Each structure stands twice: as C-alpha cells, then as structure tokens.
Amino acid sequence: MFKIINARFLAENIKMFEIEAAKIAKKRKAGQFVIIRIDEHGERIPLTIADSNLEKGTISLIVQGVGKTTKELNMKETGDTILDVVGPLGKPSEIENFGTAVSVGGGVGTAIAYPTAVALKEAGNYVITINGARSKDLVILEDEMKAVSDESYVTTDDGSYGFHGFVTQKLQELIDQGKKIDFVLAIGPIPMMRAIAEVTRPYKIKTVVSLNPIMIDGTGMCGGCRVIVNGKTQFACVDGPEFDAHAVDFKNLVDRNRTYADLEKKALEKFEHNCHLVEKINELEK
C-alpha cells in the first residue's frame, strides 16, 4: 500500500497527489512514469512523475479525471492509500545543453513538461515554456513553470488569460520573431503534439514528444503500447515514452488509442451511475 500524503485539486477535474514512495523518488528522472492500480480490482494506468521529494520520500502525480479509473482515483483524499505504484518506468528525457530549449505543455501535459523543463534549465539551457489550456481556470503549474524559465508564456484557447490562441501559434510567433530555437519538447493531447511537429518540421528544429498509447504492464511484454516510429514498431513503455516528433506515425497512434473507446465509455457510464446511486442512498439515510 502507498499512502497519499497530500491530495488537492489544481483545477476542475485535475488533482495533484503526493504519495509515499521513497525508492521511486530516489531513482526517478525527468520523463519517467509509474503504473498504478487503485485496488485489487482496478486496471493499471500509467502516470508521469511530475516531481519528487527525496527528504520526504514522496513522488507527485497529477491526474485529470476523464475515464473511470482516473475519476475514481480523483475521489481519493489525503490519508487514503493506493494498492500498487510501480516504477520508475521508461527511459528518462534526453537532457543536454541544446542552447535554447522550448518546453510546451498542453492541458495536463504541463505536469509532464514541468520536470523536463527543470532538467533542461539545470543543464544550462535558455528555457522557454509555453503552458496551454482551454481557459484560465484550467491553467496549472503556472508559477512552477515560471520559476524554471527564462521566458514563460500562458496560452488559452478562449483568450480568457494570457495569449489568445493555441500553443502552436505562440511557438510560431516566437520563430517568426527570429528567436533561434534549438530544441522543442511537446507534451499534451495527440492533435497538439502532431501540430507542434508540423510547426518545427520546416525549420528542422529537433522536436521530441511524450506519447500516451494504451499501456498495460510497462515492461514491453504485452505489446499494448506499440507505436510506429521511422516506420518501425517501438514500445512506448521501454523505448520511450519520448520519441522524435518528426518520425512518429500519429495516425496510427490515434487509431490504436481508439481501440477500446466503446468499452471505456461503458465503464465510465457504469461507474458514474453507481456513484449517483450511492449519493441518492446517502441522501435518503440522512
């Protein structure tokens, strides 16, 4: 059992968990992830390690409640426990002094972009961060990103805060202004990462994305996390999760991620139905 030391919402449906996991905290590096299982009946889901605290022996995970398991996890509170937390898994981010490095986070992808931005800064890079969200109330880790950035920008799709537009537009604006960019890391929804890759491709800017395919065991044995990179099959859990954005077959990634869409929808509907029943029963018992 892994104890939750602190749990708090950062935005609607986005929650941060600080979890006791001393061995993982000691070994983890930027870009790596864990696979968790809430209880003995739960599914296994991968979550990137957003941060760690060696003195406290804890790791931080940021979870967006979108499906049955993530919504169930976000019901956990400080003092609760999680059955399994396995990691650190995956290859660490490729960190070196590239020169000017841009870390782009879209939505909850910012939680994954943050530790890599920290590592890039520590390696001596001039770090620019672009933190995107649909609206102001969904912006996360703004202060944390600013603290490790030489330049920091927030974009919102609806214009309610910061730059009105997408992260791709802000990145293109920086390029058009003559900013020499040597490296881009992009993490977020698949359409966003694919769009970032197309922005940087004409300029031959080294660009890396962190992929989020279906993942089960995290060891490369199940084959569930297959991705196509440079026309060859790779496994995101052991060969990634970060890959050359210009070599990723994003269409294949999208198609594979839709494989269990109907089953995921049914599981979520059943979970929410049961939650409503419990709420009604609790109301009647008052």
Image (spheres, rainbow, N blue to C red):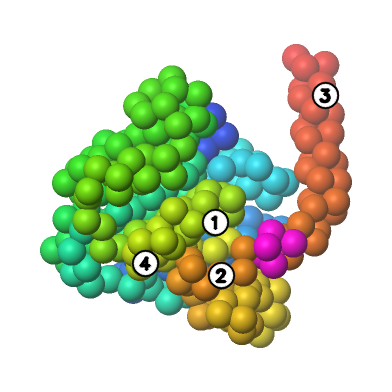
Q: Which residues are magenta?
A: 251-255
Q: Which mark is residue 281?
A: 3
Separation of residues labelled 2 and 4 (CA atoms):
15 Å
Magenta span includes 213: no
Q: Are marks 2 and 1 in contact (CB under 8 Å)?
A: yes
Residue 226 appears in the picture as rendered = yes
**189 lies left or right of 87:** right
Q: Which mark is residue 206?
A: none
Q: Position of residue 180 (x, y in %)?
A: 22, 56
**172 lies left or right of 34:** left
Say if 208 sits above or below 158 in the image.
below
Residue 61 appears in the picture as rendered = no
Mark 3 or 1: in front is 1
Q: Residues within 10 Å of mark 4 (few under 14, many from 20)?
A: few
Q: Quadrant of the C terminus?
A: top right
Mark 2 or 3 closer to N-term? 2
Q: Position of residue 82 (x, y in %)?
A: 56, 56
Q: Residues within 10 Å of mark 1 (few under 14, many from 20)?
A: many
Please, what is the three-letter code of the amino acid marked with disc 1?
Arg
The quarter of the picture where residue 23 lies is bottom left
Q: Position of residue 253 (x, y in %)?
A: 66, 64
Please, what is the three-letter code of the amino acid marked with disc 4?
Lys
**157 lies left or right of 174:** right
Mark 3 or 4: in front is 4
Residue highlighted by disc 2: 248
Separation of residues labelled 3 and 4 (CA atoms):
60 Å
Q: Are marks 4 and 1 in contact (CB under 8 Å)?
A: no
Mark 2 or 1 closer to N-term? 1
